[in-house]
Amino acid sequence: MSEPTDARLTTHVLDTSLGRPAAGIAVTLWRLGSDGGRQKVADAVTNSDGRCDAPLMAGDDFAVGEYELVFAAGAYFDTTGRDLPEPKFLSDVVIRFGIADRTHYHVPLLISPFGYSTYRGS
């Protein structure tokens, strides 16, 4: 049986308070080790559609394991011109998740200055 060819990790970010994609958010993917350490896997920035231009992990680099996606939400909110209190309620948004098989994993982020949600998308 051959390995699935669609094994990849993607994300996108929507600003639910403005009702539009969140462009310009820095995203970092970390692989978590069994010893508690982290290894950087990828860096990206969301485009005008709130998506990264390429998968964060794909092909031979795609591996089963535990990961963190870190979204620089506070820096993004600074670019939107909103008057927010300092320190901001949200700065970095960290999503810790597991990859159990070599298929397509899509981890979207829905943000506003005072809350966020995520899910396993398609």
Image (spheres, rainbow, N blue to C red):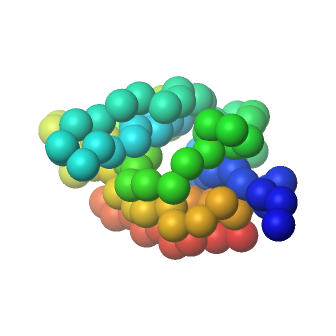
**Quadrant including the C terminus:** bottom right
The image quadrant that residue 53 belongs to is top right
Q: Which of 32 and 2 is in front in this view?
A: 2
The image quadrant that residue 61 belongs to is top right
Residue 19 percent coordinates (x, y): 63, 61
Residue at image position (17%, 37%) is: 86
Q: In this view, does 76 lie to the left or right of 86?
A: right
Residue 31 percent coordinates (x, y): 40, 41
Q: Which of 49 and 77 is in front in this view?
A: 49
Res. 50 in view: no
Residue at image position (83%, 60%) is: 2
Residue at image position (22%, 37%) is: 37
Q: Is residue 102 above or below residue 71?
A: below
Res. 65 in view: yes
Residue 121 percent coordinates (x, y): 64, 70
Residue 47 percent coordinates (x, y): 70, 34
Q: In this view, does 59 lie above or below 12?
A: above
In this rendering, the count of numbered labels is 0
Residue at image position (78%, 57%) is: 3
Q: Is residue 107 left or right of residue 29?
A: right
The image quadrant that residue 5 belongs to is bottom right
**Quadrant including the N terminus:** bottom right
